Every structure is written in structure tokens, then in C-alpha cells.
Image (cartoon, coloured by chain):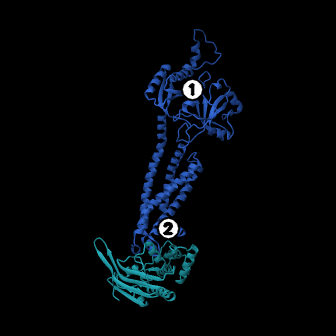
Chain colours: A blue, B cyan
Amino acid sequence: MTKHLLKLVWNRKRINFLITVEIFFSFIVLFGVVLAAVYYVDNYNQPLGFAYENVWRVAVEMNDRGEDSQSSQIAQTDGTTPKEPTEKAEPVTATTFKQLIASAKEFDEVEAVATATVTPYGDGTDTSAIGDDSHPIRYGVNVVSDDYLQTLGLTLTRGRWFGKEDDGANYQPVVINERLSRDVFGDADPLGKELRRPNLPPKQEEEKRTPMRIVGVISEFRKDGEYTAPENFLFARQLLNNQMSREPRCLMLKVRSGTTAEFEEKVIKRFQSVAKDWSFEIEPVTKMRETANTFRLAPLIAGTLVAGFLMLMVAMGLTGVLWQNVTQRTREIGLRRAKGATARRIHKQILAELVIIATFGLIFGVAAVVQFPLLDVIGDISSRVFSLSILISLAVIYALTAVCGLYPSWMATKVQPAEALHYE
Amino acid sequence: MIQLEGIEKVYRTERIETVALTNINLTVGEGEFISIMGPSGSGKSTLLNVIGLLDVPTGGKVALNSKPVTSYSDRNLARVRNEEIGFVFQTFHLIHDLSVVDNVEIPLLYRKGISSSERRKLALRALDRVGLHARVHHFPGQLSGGQQQRVAIARAIVGNPRILLADEPTGNLDSQMGDEIMDVLKGLNENEKTTVVMVTHDPRQAEKTERVVRLFDGRQVS
């Protein structure tokens, strides 16, 4: 029977062409939406690597930028010519941040506080790369103070977090995530190893920068949240002394559970008293997460609405075309009944023909979408997510065509054979 | 072979009631070749449909091979139509998107236990019996009316039914082609003892049958 139906569908290819085209385009559009949805769900199900509950981000705007350069002179202003400093003085920024941290710790509501250059779910980003130019291994960077591990609830899997034991070291202590460790060192233990920066010959690198030495490994850190793909990540130690090379951009506060928004005002007042010229803005990370996730999901929701509308149109079109098709074939259906087909058999045949027609459209559809990774139009999506998206899209289209075919094929079985044979 | 007892057929709509057959009693013996005649609207085709289990009578009983079939389920009716009865229609009812041999295979598709190669073999043999072995891969549109009716006959006999029901098989053909078709039906009746019931308007063709049943306004008049 399958061979018979294949032959029938093939010989009616002109009539079936439009349905095939309709199914082809529906599949392409649906695949795009399903791929995005599966990608998000897959990302969502992977560990985030940090705890965002009860964490507040205090954005710091350092308005007076002239102080740091004058700091050493101010310290020695006594009416005489300043002496050549024997040691670089601590920048005011570093001092102020230390004071801010100390003042924050005075609150009972604050469990931990740390500085950072990048905020989870925040707009800012900082990336770097290692390896050669042709195969760079990219990673995100966050320069954080020693208490960041506790503040964000990161999980150490190997080694240690950086701390006072690294003071005065001739290397820059860094903590990387397991993903970056795998990419750079494979199965080897990364602890104690150095990460080489790109584009610098070893000699030049030595002269310019302190080497980055891995002191610990964390399980994961997905700075942009649960809907983005996991990425390589590196934490460098923020020094708040005369060795400070980068200024923090914010403070992260881990507050006690149940701390209300009213506490925000108290914190800002205290901080303002410490750094009068700076401005502060507090936002709970949960709120930042909500905003970031809404922003990420918006295109998916829009795509789903468009695809849903398209599917509805396709479903109505298919039902109409099939209905017409069945009506035109009433006499053939009568003939088949006369030759021994049961009503159920006719019902199944109409559906089977539809499935075959859909399969033709879907073969072309799958052939088209498998080109996407080759043409690099969908970015870095795993083959598992890609394959699953194809399977889901196929299932949805088959289900849609089957549902569309149910009523027309049921109608086909309702006509009495004698009546069908004389249908005009 | 075929027994009809008190057959009534009434078509009812919301507004009108049309009586198509009234008290038809008919027995057709095995190997008989009969024709049913009557003016248009006299109920000839309706009677043939009732005999062929394509239509359900409003009243009366139908028995095939002494088995009452009136109360059969759709599945059993389909089986009887497939195994016991072959149909030939005035307008051939060939599927134009299938080749001649594929058309002939259709009844065998609904029969269990026949392989694809066996189906093809039986279809070719049936086409050979009606003298169309050279046109098996043609499509119906490439054949003359007489050839198309031969294909329809081949399709009707491919499953070796004991009863052949022909609804004006020569109605759409010229007299020469009509005679050829009658020869084929005659041959099946005489050589293979197939029971043939034929509806016709043509007295010349009716004369070639063993018995003529006449209908008028849904009643059997002879």
C-alpha cells in the first residue's frame, strides 16, 4: 500500500506541490523558533555558577577623576618642593573603596561585600583571549576583591580562591572556571600553571606584564545569566593598594535574607558620607536578572507569536486544500469502497497521503536547515540542540498535518459508496 | 447465488421522499448472465448498488451464497465486495494518475496476504484476459473508451470474484466497442462461470444475456 500511495502522490506532484512548499516554509520558520527555544531551555538547565538571591549591585560613579594623580603630592604638601617618591603611593580610589567596604561591613544586614569590574546580568563586559591568533580561546574577565567568592556564592572545585597569601607575589593570581580549564589544559591539572596572553612574544610579555598563575578553579560562572550559552571565565584579583591596576566599577553586597529596599537608602547615605563626590546606585541582582531575561526572551516570544500565527494560517490552508482535495476525489473514494476498502481504510489512506506529502516538504526543509551550521548562520549551537530542534520541528509539522487531515479524511468516510460513485 | 427478498429503497430528505425500489424479489443463479432494463429513473442502478452492497436497502433482505448480508458491518461488507463481487461502471472510474496495471491492482491492495509481486502478476494476468497486455504501463488518458472499459473489467475480475456487476458497461462506447465489451463479459460468464448482472439501456446487448429483468418506477415488471 505504501508503494501505491507513494506512486499516487508522486504522480499528483503538480497538485501536491503547493502543499509541499507550504510545509517546507512552515518547517523553516518553526525550526528557527524551536531552535531558539531549545537553545534557551538547554542553557537554562545548566548550572549558573553563582547565587543571585539577596545580592545587591552598587554601581559606583567616580566623578572626581583628578584626585589619584595628585594623591602623592597631597600627601607631601608642606610648602616645600615635593620629594621624588621612593614608592608609588596608594591611589585615593583604592583607599576610598577600602573605606566603602569597611563601612558596608558595619551593617548587620550585610553578610559579605566585594568589588568587581563586571556585574552578573549587567551590560558591561570584559573579554580577553589566549592561544594563537588562528585559534584564540576567548574568556570573560572579572577583576574582583577577595570576598567575591562568598558574596556571589561561587563553588570552588579545585585549589583556592585568592587572598592575603598572594600579597606581594610575583604573579597575578587568577581563578578560572572548569570550562576554560578544559579548553586550555584538557584533562591536565591547571593549578599552578600560567596562562599566556595572546599576541605577545614570551619575552615582551615578561617585560610588560606579571604572569597570570592559576590558583583555583570554580565550577561555572555565567555572567550573562541562564539563557546565554556557558562561557569560559577568569577571575583576577583586585588589589586595593598602590599596585592597583584597574579600578572597580561596582560593589557587590550580600545582604541577609529579608532585607528590605529601605536599607538601600541607608547604604547610599553611608557611602555618600565616605565618598562625597561619588554617586551610587543600588539594584538587586534579582531585578537585573529579570530585566536581562525579559530582554533575552522578547525576540523568542515575538518569534513564537509570528510562528504560531503562521502555523494557524498553514493549518487553515491545509485543511481547506485537503477538504477540496477530498471532495474532488469523492468518486475515487467511492471506487475504493466498491473495491473493498473500509471507511477506516479510506481515513487512514487520506492521512497517509498527507504524511507522504508532508515528508517531501520536510525532506527539503531538513536539507535546507542542515546547511545553516555549514554557512555559520546560527552561531555556536551544539549539535545536540540542533538535532533536537530538528526532531521537535518535524514532530510539530507532522502533528499539524495530521490534525489538519483528520476532519477532511473523516468527511471522506461519511459518503456512502453508491453516492460517492455518482458524485458530480 | 444472489437472493433479493422484498427489497425497498426510499430516499428521504427533509422535504421529499423518493421511492426508488418497491418490493423487488429476485434470484440470480450461479453462472447466470442477466440484464436489468428499464427507463431512466426506474431504479436499475439502485438495484445494482443494493446487490453489490454499495447501498443499504430501506427494507427487505439481501443474501449472497445463501448468507444474509443486510446486517453486515462495514468491515464485512468491504470484505464481501472485495472477494465476492466485481464492479464495472459506465464511466469506467479509472484513476487517471495511476497506470493501467496500477489501476487493476487496486482491489488486491485491500486483500490481506498478497505480496507486491503477486499483485503485479495477478494484475498482468487479468489484463491479458481482456486483451490489454500491451498497454499495462499506459495511463487511462492514453487509451480509447473501449480500452478503458477493458481495464475496468480487468480490475473487476483481478480478484476472481464469483459475481460481476456491470452498470451500463457499453453506455459510453460506440456499438463496435460495446460489442467487444459484451464479448469479454460473455467470455467470462461462459468460460469461468462468473455470474454477471448487467444494467443496460440497449435491447441489442440485453438480448445477448440469458434473462432480462425489467423495472418501471422502481417496480419489477418482468
Q: Label 2: few (<14), some or many (≥20) within 10 Å?
A: some
Mark 2 residue element: loop
**Badge 2: chain ID:** A
Instruction: Judge by depth and name the residue closer to the eye, B7 or A139.
Output: B7
Evaluate if marks 1 and 2 touch, with contact meaning CB atoms under 8 Å apart: no
Return the x and y of residue A98 as percentages of the image width and height: 55, 22
**Badge 1: chain ID:** A
Q: Is residue A76 left or right of residue B208?
A: right
Disc 1 designates what residue?
Answer: A247
List the single residue furthest toward the right: A203
Amino acid type at mark 2: Arg
Q: Is residue A338 left or right of residue A51?
A: left
Q: Tag on residue A12?
A: 2
Q: Is residue A392 left or right of residue B24?
A: right
User: Is residue B197 visible in the rendered structure shown here?
Assistant: yes
User: Is residue B139 visible in the rendered structure shown here?
Assistant: no
- Location of residue B83 with respect to A308 vertically, above or below: below
- Location of residue B175 with respect to A280 vertically, above or below: below
List the single residue furthest toward the front: B67
